[in-house]
Image (cartoon, helix red, strand yellow):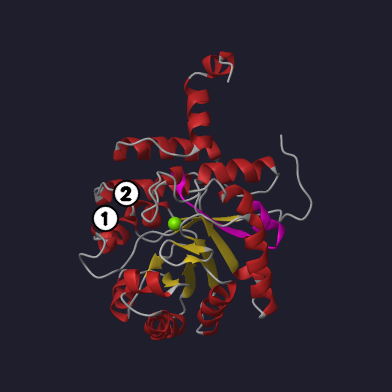
Amino acid sequence: MSTPLPGLPSLVEVYEVGPRDGLQNEASVLPVQVKAEFVRRLLAAGLSTIELTSFVPAGRVPQLADAEELLALLGPLPGRHPVLVPTQKGLDRALAAGAREIAVFASATETFAQRNLRRSVAGSLAMFRPVVTRARTEGLAVRGYVSMCFGDPWEGPVPQAQVVDVALRLHEMGCTEISLGDTIGVGTPGQVVELLRGLSAVGMAIGRVAVHFHDTYGQALANTLAALQAGVTTVDASAGGLGGCPYAASATGNLATEDLVWQLHGLGVDTGIDLDALVRTSVWMAEQLGRPSPSRALAALAATSASPSAANEKSC
Ligand code: MG
């Protein structure tokens, strides 16, 4: 049973970040065969947009050091399967591995740009420009991430003008989609709507803007709903809430795909995802990682399917 609300899209593209953003931030390093199995299970559950991995310099992200092997194991896949690429060399590797879409990861704040990319904001955009230009020439789609859109752990609240400026520069250099990241999960719905208004005001099409919320402060679903009502139709999420949050002392980072899909289906919004199959996939992945998932929808659904009568008898 679903009950719609006015002003929502009929279909939302769930952009699955578990294999890249999720696994990159998990302490365990999984065998490449397990990662390939994870992607195959996600595809079978109806997730057709999956960010697979990252072509960063060897040693920078040990969890994703097997990018070439993973793409070779997977072979050609239906749907959208971007890979993160920071540099020209990364793009060479991604193209050789058969990637058809890439993503670049920019920051709205100077401190995070320095910490993550060892460059200023302007310097990092200058690094991305030839990567984006060449990727587009090669016929690839390019997603541009803007991280720290609402708050930064070192700089505090982030002025909206900074975010709009970085998003616009990524758009102007050729990015085909912009993903707004609340990297520390501090944003609230009014801020989300204001930022989307600000981007609209400089001519950006909101239909090409995605949102990437973290649930650190429990705001991810409220922020998502506000973004959908403001015209967004692509939402980033991580199966089982994989990834934690490396910039806050919290187990809760990426919005869990199960929590998102529960809300969307409850609203009558189509995603193409089989939630039961997704839950089975995340339960399996939690076993591989040896830690429970922080997703509340996953916990509830996994408990109900294991013992529906026991779940119903509990008064909670
Ligand atoms: Mg994230």
Quarter of the image with the N terminus is top right
Q: Quadrant of residue 261?
A: top right
Identify the residue under disc 2.
26
Kind of residue indicated by mark 2: Glu
Measured from the top left, where is residue 139 in percent x and y?
A: 47, 79
Residue drawn at the location 30% of the way across and 36% of the way down: 290
Q: Are marks 2 and 1 in contact (CB under 8 Å)?
A: yes
Ligand 1 image position (quadrant): bottom left
- Circle 1 residues within 10 Å: few <14, some 14–19, many ≥20: many
Q: Secondary structure at mark 1?
A: helix
Q: Which residue is mark 1?
A: 63
Mark 2 and ligand 1: say if the CB distance to the nearest ligand atom is below 8 Å: no
Please say if 108 is above or below 126: above
Residue at x-position 34% and y-position 52%: 23
In which quadrant is the C terminus drawn? top right
Q: Nearer the viewer, residue 234 or 81?
A: 234
> Looking at the picture, how far across and down is residue 248, in whole percent?
40, 52
**Is residue 8 something one can see in this rendering?**
yes
Q: Considering only order in the chain, which callout, 1 or 2, is on the residue closer to the N terminus?
A: 2
Looking at the image, which residue is at 48% across and 29% down?
Answer: 302
**In this rendering, would 218 be left or right of 22?**
right
Depth check: 79 or 7 in front? 7
Q: Specify start and end residues of the magenta stretch as a single range.
A: 225-239
